Image (cartoon, grey):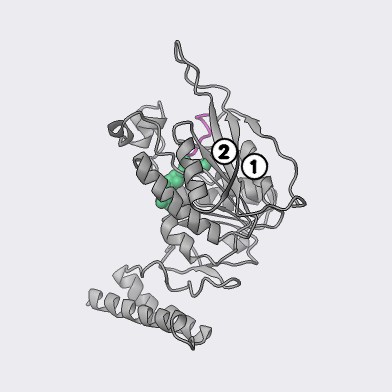
């Protein structure tokens, strides 16, 4: 019975999509919304736990500019409906896969991308790369380690391909001239600059994050820095409303006592980096982790959206950006939670 319903919905969706996009006379939007978001369809989706193809889902009626991105009950069972369109002013974390979520945003929604993707690094050979992230990136005993995170075991070729795929989709969802900043280490730096340009972004430079302390190695240089590859979605106007920003950031990693993610970035550094986005632009972090970028953006007065695949970290990030810290500053995050 369940698969029958799932198939029926898929057929319905395909039909509606075909009418909407391929035929000369699209069905009216409200009719489309009614069909896809009806209680009956949503009930069946919940019962079958069926996720429609990522091009279309209930609550994601269009990629046209001005339409909204909306999280329905199927997407976020424990999270109320949230709409994200050009008027969004909150801070919000979406639990999901970047490749499934990104295509659902309308063109030109975001003012910039600030992110820290899984490096798929932290090892010298492919076997070592398959180890848990807690083993690769943490010296803590297994019982004390923070939970592992997703997407860190790809080899370099697959990683570059995957990066290109999401980077191209992210560019479509950004305004012309939008900046992008991505953290990376020395091993993956060349692949990241390849992927960025392959996806159509203009590569503009590399910033250095001096972590100040790291493991000493006799007879070798310390791997004391990580890097931020940055670029833009086409031409950047000289008169854009962003300050002069440093090219080197000197800040240690958050201490083990306060860290919520194995590879958490310092909030102070993120608060500087987000300022490359023009005021009012919605910042997207497609790899939110414990929510540091979204929290930094919120503290600097930007609307921001994070995507995170791990359920544990999506919850951590959501608590962080909509919880105690927001309450303490009296900030309004109501549009995003
Ligand atoms: C390097 S961490 C980000 C840490 C973050 N900057 C912080 O300060 O907490 C990268 C995150 O991307 C998430 N991730 C990996 N693959 C993903 C995917 N396909 N879609 C969304 N998130 C993903 C991982 O679970 C991980 O938490």
Quarter of the image for the N terminus: give it: bottom left
Question: Does 217 appear above or below 205?
Answer: above
Instruction: Name the residue tied to disc 1.
Output: 273
Q: Residue furthest left?
A: 1
Question: Does 72 appear above or below 280?
Answer: below
84 vs 137, left or right, is right
Quarter of the image for the C terminus: give it: bottom right
Mark 1 element type: helix
Mark 2 element type: strand
63 vs 269, left or right, is left
Mark-to-mark CA distance, 2 and 1? 10 Å
Instruction: Name the residue tied to disc 2.
Output: 228
> Magenta region: which residues?
255-261
Q: Residues within 10 Å of mark 2 (few under 14, many from 20)?
A: many
**Mark in front: 2 vs 1:** 2
- Please say whether residue 191 is one of the residues in the magenta stretch: no
């Amino acid at each position: 019975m369940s698969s029958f319903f799932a198939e029926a919905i898929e057929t319905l969706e395909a039909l509606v999509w075909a009418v909407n996009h391929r035929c000369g006379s699209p069905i009216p939007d409200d009719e489309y919304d009614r069909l896809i978001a009806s209680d009956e369809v949503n009930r069946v989706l919940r019962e079958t736990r069926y996720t429609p193809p990522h091009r279309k889902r209930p609550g994601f009626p269009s990629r046209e500019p001005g339409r909204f991105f909306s999280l329905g009950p199927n997407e976020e069972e424990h999270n109320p409906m949230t709409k994200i369109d050009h008027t969004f002013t909150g801070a919000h974390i979406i639990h999901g896969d970047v490749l499934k979520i990104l295509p659902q945003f309308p063109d030109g929604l975001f003012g910039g991308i600030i992110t820290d993707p899984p490096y798929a690094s932290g090892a010298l050979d492919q076997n070592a790369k398959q180890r848990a992230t807690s083993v690769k990136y943490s010296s803590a005993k297994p019982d004390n380690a923070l939970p592992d995170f997703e997407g860190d075991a790809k080899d370099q070729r697959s990683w570059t391909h995957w990066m290109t795929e999401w980077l191209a989709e992210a560019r479509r969802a950004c305004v012309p001239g939008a900046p992008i900043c991505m953290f990376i280490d020395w091993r993956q730096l060349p692949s990241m600059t390849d992927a960025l340009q392959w996806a159509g972004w203009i590569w503009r430079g590399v910033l250095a994050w001096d972590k100040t302390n790291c493991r000493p190695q006799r007879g070798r240089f310390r791997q004391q820095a990580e890097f931020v590859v940055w670029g833009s979605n086409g031409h950047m106007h000289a008169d854009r409303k962003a300050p002069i920003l440093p090219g080197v950031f000197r800040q240690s990693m958050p201490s083990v006592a306060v860290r919520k993610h194995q590879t958490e970035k310092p909030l102070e550094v993120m608060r500087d980096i987000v300022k490359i986005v023009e005021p009012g632009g919605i910042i997207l972090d497609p790899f939110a982790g414990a929510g540091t970028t979204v929290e930094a953006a919120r503290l600097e007065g930007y609307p921001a959206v994070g995507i995170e695949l791990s359920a544990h970290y999506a919850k951590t990030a959501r608590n962080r950006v909509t919880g105690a810290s927001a309450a303490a500053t009296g900030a309004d995050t109501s549009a995003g939670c």
